[in-house]
Amino acid sequence: PRMPGHLGLYLGLTGLRLAGADAVHAGLATHLVKKDDLPALREALARDGAACVAGFAQTLPAFTLAPHRDTIDRCFGKPTVPEIFAALAAEGTDWAAATLKELRAVSPSSVFWSFEILKRGANMSLRAALHEELKLTRKVAFHPEFHEGVRAALVDKDRKPQWNPARVEDVDPAAIAAMFE
């Protein structure tokens, strides 16, 4: 939740994974190093300490999310999940439509849980945030939505989960709040 703008909320809700240069651009890493250089970097770190990392760093290619950063901040900066969905729908771009489609494919309840835990984590220490995430994970593991996701992905492998509720618009805020009690 502390990434630049609303990038952390976007990544947390969509589940998009960042690697390499994108991890540096997002603030998750400090340097990009070629895989082939890692053994030499390991030796240099042991010998010279962290100051040597810059000598192995590669020039960063452009951030792949750069063309969408304004849209990410505009849409994922909204104060509620329904407002994020409405903002994405109002954008009228292929990227926003694809992002909305991805978000509508996952459990609506899980989008709300993720939104809430990320919002709370922004004002917590790392230790406290991880503790809260563990508490939520323990509740989610026993929730019917989790079991439905496992069924669809791993048991029946039909990739057709039947979420309940099926739409973000039908999620009961009281049910979400109960997960955080």
Image: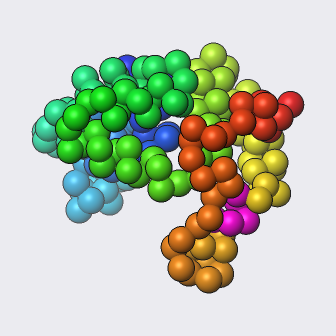
Figure quadrant of residue 100: top left
For this rendering, which residue is in front, 1 or 67? Answer: 67
Q: With respect to residue 179, does 77 lie above or below?
A: above
On the image, the x and y values in percent for residue 45 come to 38, 44
Residue 47 in view (yes/no): no
Residues drawn in magenta: 145-149
Q: With respect to residue 151, does 99 lie above or below?
A: above
Residue occupying the point 31% across, 56% down: 38
Residue occupying the point 53% across, 54% down: 106
Badge count: 0
Figure quadrant of residue 7: top left
On the image, the x and y values in percent for residue 159 come to 51, 73
Residue occupying the point 17% across, 33% down: 67
On the image, the x and y values in percent for residue 4 come to 37, 22
Instruction: State whether the magenta stretch is mostly helix, strand or loop.
Output: helix
For this rendering, which residue is in front, 13 or 19? Answer: 13
Image position of 154 (left or right of 145): left
Residue 175 in view (yes/no): yes
On the image, the x and y values in percent for residue 180 come to 79, 32
For this rendering, which residue is in front, 20 or 179? Answer: 179
- Its colouring scheme is rainbow
Residue occupying the point 60% across, 53% down: 166
